[in-house]
Image (spheres, rainbow, N blue to C red):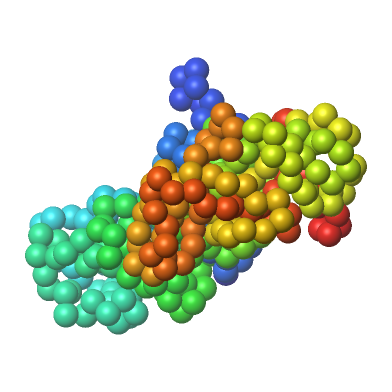
Amino acid sequence: MAALSIDGATKHFGATEVLKNLSVEVAPGEFAVIVGPSGCGKSTLLRCVAGLEQLDSGRIHIADRDVTHLAPSERGVAMVFQSYALYPHLRVRENMGFALRIAKMDKARIDEAVNRAAAILGIEPLLDRKPAALSGGQRQRVAIGRAIVRQPQLFLFDEPLSNLDADLRVRMRREFAELHRTLRTTTLYVTHDQVEAMTLADRIIILRDGRIEQVGAPRDLYARPANRFVAGFLGTPRMNFLAATVSDAGRATLANGHSIALPATAAPLAPGTPLTLGIRPEHLALGEGAEALSLKITFVERLGSAAIAHFESPGDGEALTCQTRDDGALREGARAAVRFAPDHLHLFGSDGQRLARKDEL
C-alpha cells in the first residue's frame, strides 16, 4: 500500500488559478474522496496526480517517490474515467488487458490477471462481449477491471458513477466499498455527489475555489464543520441558517425578535455580536415547549415514512426545513411549533468560521 502526498500544488489555465497552493496527505490503503461544487478544481487535482496535467508549482509523492515530473505510465497509478473510455472494437478481455499487452507482458500472465480481476468483479460471463453489448453498470465494472489488472499503487476515480441511474448508483457504491475492502489499494475518488462521499470515504477532502476547506472523517465533518460553507455543503436537506445577535450570556435574538438559548462556547460572546445559527433539518424539534416558535408550513415533501416540512423564515432570511417522521399530521398552510435545541446548534462568526463549543475542548 502506498501513501500519496501533495505539497503546495498550484495550477493555472491561462489567467485562472485553478489549484491554489493545495497540500494534502492520503494514508496507505485509505479511500479518500474529493468533493466540492462544480469548478472547484476536483478533476484538475486528480489529473495532476495522474500526470495528465502538469503542476505549475508544488510536488507530488507516491510511496515516497517524487512523481511530479514523471509520465503517467511511470507513476504507478490507474485511472477510471467518467466516460469509461473503453475501446468499442475490442472485447472485454482485450479492453481489460490492453495496458499489459502494450507493456509486452506474457500472454499467460495477461490472461491470469484479467481472469482474476473478472472474478473479483463478477464479470467472467462478459469477457467475450464488446462494450456495445454491455449495460452502463457492466461497462463501469470493465473500466474498473482494466485498472485492477495493472496492480497500481494508487487508484484514481473521476466521477465514475455520474452517468448511471439512481438505483444503479446505489448498487455500485456498495460494490466500490466491497472492492476497496478486498484490495485495500490507496484510492483517490472525485465526485460532486456528497452522498457518495459520505458513504464511501475513510476521509473526505472538501474543496472550494481551488483550496481545501476541511479534511476529515465523514461523521466528523458532518458533526463539526469548520465553517458555514462545509456545514451547508454536507447534508441533504442542507443545514438551516438563521441570522442572530448575542443578547446576553448564553442567549441570542433572531431577526424577528425571538430569543433562544445558545450552547456554551469556548470563548465568551459579547452582547451585540452578530452570529449565524445553524441547525440540521433532522434536529429541528416540532411540538410545544419552552421557547417554541410558531411558524407557517409552506410545503411538505412526503417520502413515505419520513417527510420534509418547509417553514416560513423566522425573519427575512431563508426558509427552514425539518426532516421528521410522517404521521400525516403536517399540513401546508397550518402553523406548527418549532424548537431549536441548544445541543444541536452550530454557531458561526461573521467570518463564516464555526465557533468552538465548550464541550468540544
Residue at screen point 43% across, 76% down: 178
Q: Nearer the viewer, residue 54 or 288?
A: 288
Q: Is residue 112 left or right of residue 136?
A: right
Rendered-image quadrant of the C terminus: bottom right
Q: Is residue 2 left or right of residue 43?
A: right
Residue 255 x/y as whole percent: 66, 31
Residue 253 x/y as whole percent: 74, 37
Q: Quadrant of residue 105?
A: bottom left
Q: Quadrant of residue 343?
A: bottom right
Rendered-image quadrant of the N terminus: bottom right
Q: Is residue 49 left or right of residue 84?
A: right
Q: Quadrant of residue 133?
A: bottom left
Q: Residue furthest top?
A: 15
Q: Is residue 48 visible?
A: no
Q: Is residue 89 visible?
A: yes
Q: Nearer the viewer, residue 119 or 52?
A: 119
Residue 17 x/y as whole percent: 54, 25
Residue at screen point 62% across, 47% down: 293
Task: Answer above or below: position of 272 versus 280.
Answer: above
